[in-house]
Image: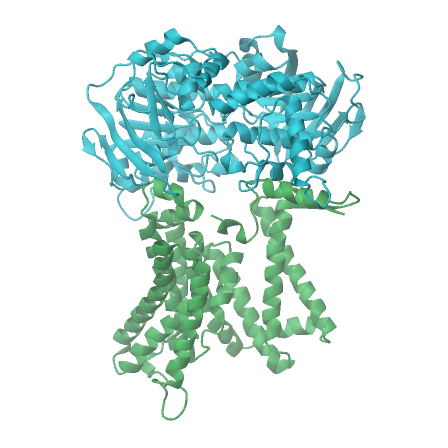
Chain colours: A cyan, B green
Amino acid sequence: MVGQIQASLGAGGETSAGENGNAYKEDAYNGNAYNGNAYVEMSGICKHFGDVRANYQVRLSVRQGEIHAILGENGSGNSTLMNMLTGIYSPDAGEIRLAGRPVSFTAPKDAIDQGIGMVHQHFKLVEVFTAKENIIAGSKTGFWLRGKALSKEIRETCAKFGLDIDPDKKIYELSVGEKQRVEIVKMLFRGARVLILDEPTAVLTPQETRQLFDILRKMRAQNCAIVIITHKLHEVMEISDRVTIMRRGEYIDTVETAKTDSRALTEMMVGRPVDLNIRRQPAHTSERPVLEIKDLTAIGSHGQRVLDNMSFSVYGGEILGVAGIAGSGQKEICEIIAGLSKAAGGSARFLGDEILGLSPIEILRRGVSMSFVPEDRLGMGLVAGMDIVANVMLRSYQKKKGAFIDQNFGRQKAEEIVSRYDVSTPSVRHVLKKLSGGNIQKVLLGREVDLAPALLITAYPVRGLDIGASYHVYNVLSQQKEAGVAVLFIGEDLDVLLQLCDRLMVMHGGRVMDIVDPAKVTKEEVGLLMLGHKPEPGTAAGPERELATAAVGGDRGNREASEKNSEEGAGRD
Amino acid sequence: MIKITRKAEASFKKALVAQVAAIVAALAAAGLIMAIIGYNPLEVYSQIIAGALGSAYRVRASFNKIIPLVILSLGVAVAFKMTFWNIGAEGQMAMGGFGAAYVALHYGHLSPWILLPAMMAAGVFCGAVWALIPALLKTKFNTSETLVTLMMNYIALKWITYLQYGPWKEGGFPKIPTFTANAVLPSVLGIHSGWIIALALTAGVHILLTKAKLGYEIAVIGESPTTARYSGIAVTRVIVIAMALSGALCGMAGMIQSSAVEKTLSEGFTAGLGFTAVITTWLARLSAPGIVLTSFIFGMLLQGGSFLEISLRISADMAKMLQAIIIFFVLGSEFFLNYRVRFGAGDKGAAAAAAVSAAAEPTAPAAAGGKEAR
């Protein structure tokens, strides 16, 4: 991993001069005429889905050589807007102009033919194909694949923007960051002059994010227009030149990033001032751990060790955060604790009793509650096609006696959750999949918290949530902690993990790398641990180490401090 | 060039209108085919109606098809609600008939008060066993329930044929003996009393699917087995119970058909009703009251169709063709509910790209097979 970082940093430094890669389509509007003026101009855009007004009189103007952030809460219409710019939807009203010329797209292909490409949050790559095959799939390349020549062309495109990928590697061999780069190259290779990225950093480590931003800056230098959809404010501040803010399907404003700040942006986005501080109350932890995991090992479907001798404890009244690259064993640990899958060895004691081998319902009855938000949000824990009442009842209907469902009880609970967590829905009888992502998550978390568990496991609870809703979730977790609940919080956003958690466990490849004190560790150090690099003071740093440290600007003093805070599982590497 | 874009989700009312329109269009299309092969479609349709409702005898004959259709569809609905594609209603019905016939032939001298419940129990048991086999194979070995239930139909049907031509034949004739009068369900209001059972079962299944814990669990499994597992539902157990129930209902249909209508067991006594039930269930959108409605329509269609053979000398297959056309149109109408199709000039490849974008939409509910991909 660090080797790749090294390679890409090296390549980036050397190749920014290689401007004239011939794989890159120079289009007719490539002059400087539109610098400073809008290259992409959308105006008066309206889009309705049935009764839902997704976009109303929205405008957007993006210049060449600009990184333009679109900031908006979930459901504010920014994805709809981008879907119209990329030809997935057609607007009901309004005009799209490209380089001053009106255009109309009826299919994604129309848009890419005009040089507008999008990198989606969930990559659209064929896992068993090589990067090259994915890049050329669907593009006009004639009958023959022209293997070597194409590899060369791709390498040249990559070099031009400091993108580091091996065109002949299969997708499943690549890391998340590399897959994303393949997506970007795919768009560039098809001649994209406007690149739209939807939540590009959601799945990246801090190091990968930094790399991505370097790439975007290079593209900006090459006069590309870049649109990035995000709701991470610090990223908006760091990378963008201008920001367009949207709220509830309407255009609010476009401002220059240098002339604004996070607070003002949040206020525009949410429509009211939002307190962005997470108040971390000191933890009053229980003496005995609520959950004690020892030497837990699990074998995956291909015989690989998805959990490798994990040991950790969660105490009542604390939030134990879990950081790690996606697929480091987070899902497996959740599933084993909840009784959904089997462990190959080790033990999991809940309040002193072994729970490995119990059925999910028995574990639930003992007071373990889990709200796992998977990538598709609805796959686990919720039933998309049923209404809120049916979903709320899912975890409690079995406690009631008799053969029938107590609809009134369910309805009452659902109404309670809807009002307490401010779920916006026409009624509790509304089908869940018609709600927005944030509201769906509120229902899920509200239901789990409502069970008054002794252990609350929550994985990615704010995935896809807007700022207001996210902070609401953090507050709920803090309240649970203060009420003495042991909270295991598996998260993605390192900033939040560091602010919210009392202790932070970093996982890599199914192992506990370290358990650190969030108050005494830097983001970069956690990032390194996530990549599987355990700092060992006293060991001579190899060239790789050195580079990685240099790359992330690590702080040795802090690292040593964190060393003292490490717990069980620290000695392994 | 044709362009296809996704629409917002249609309301219930719109869906209903589309369904009715689809049936009307299907009748028109079938009428066209009739006209092409030289029959006056209006005459054919009026003969179908006359055949289904024209006399007291024909009405009774219609009910002989409607009653098993209702019960079979209820059985299919329980399985479908769980997205367990049980298309083995035909075989489960045959086995139900076998169970009932076994009791009727061996204990025909008993009082009907004992005999009929015993026949029902045997029919229900055999139907349930026949459905349990694919359920267990599915839960143990993750076999495709569609294939297994389909194949088991043929085993069941051939088993009946074997009985008729072998061990159970009467004298030298390949015919199973007629049941004693004690083994025949009595008539109530001129129609065999199966209708009372059908109505009671309709109410029962309706309550099961809308009010009972088991029905709720079945629905959760149908929507998302992972969620069901996670929320502590004993998924395997519920699948087994629901399939037993599904098979039991189909078995009950078999018992009623052999006892009240055929008064014996014969090869072909299921008459494809188990397959028609898949259609009626789907058209009723798995709702028990809806099933009664669709079963009426299709039962009358079948009866009216067989009447065509006598009145117009058209093969009864005309009615089957009509069934198939209705299915095509109704499934097709679901596509038009979800997608907007525009005709107009466009560059080549645009439609293909649109289709790709439609496929990329994760929530796109495909017509029939959409739920199958779980």
Identified at 64% across, 33% down, the residue is A186
- Answer with left or right where residue A346 lies relative to residue A555: left
Q: Nearer the viewer, residue A398 or B365?
A: B365
- Answer with left or right where residue A80 lies relative to residue A143: left
Q: Nearer the viewer, residue A415 or B280?
A: B280
Q: Nearer the viewer, residue A521 or B334?
A: A521
Query: Can residue A390 be seen here?
Result: yes
Q: Is residue B20 above or below residue B232?
A: below
Query: Can residue A430 be seen here?
Result: no
Picture quarter containing residue A28?
A: top right
| Residue A153: x %, y % from top left | 68, 32
- Answer with left or right where residue A160 lies relative to residue A391: right
| Residue A487: x %, y % from top left | 32, 24
Q: Is residue A180 above or below residue A266?
A: below
| Residue A263: x %, y % from top left | 53, 9
Q: Nearer the viewer, residue B91 or B325?
A: B91
Please give the count of numbered marks on the rendered protein. 0
Identified at 72% across, 28% down, the residue is A24
- Residue furthest toward the bottom? B172
Q: Is residue B215 above or below residue A104?
A: below
| Residue B111: x %, y % from top left | 26, 79
Identified at 51% across, 77% down, the residue is B56
Picture quarter containing residue A60?
A: top right
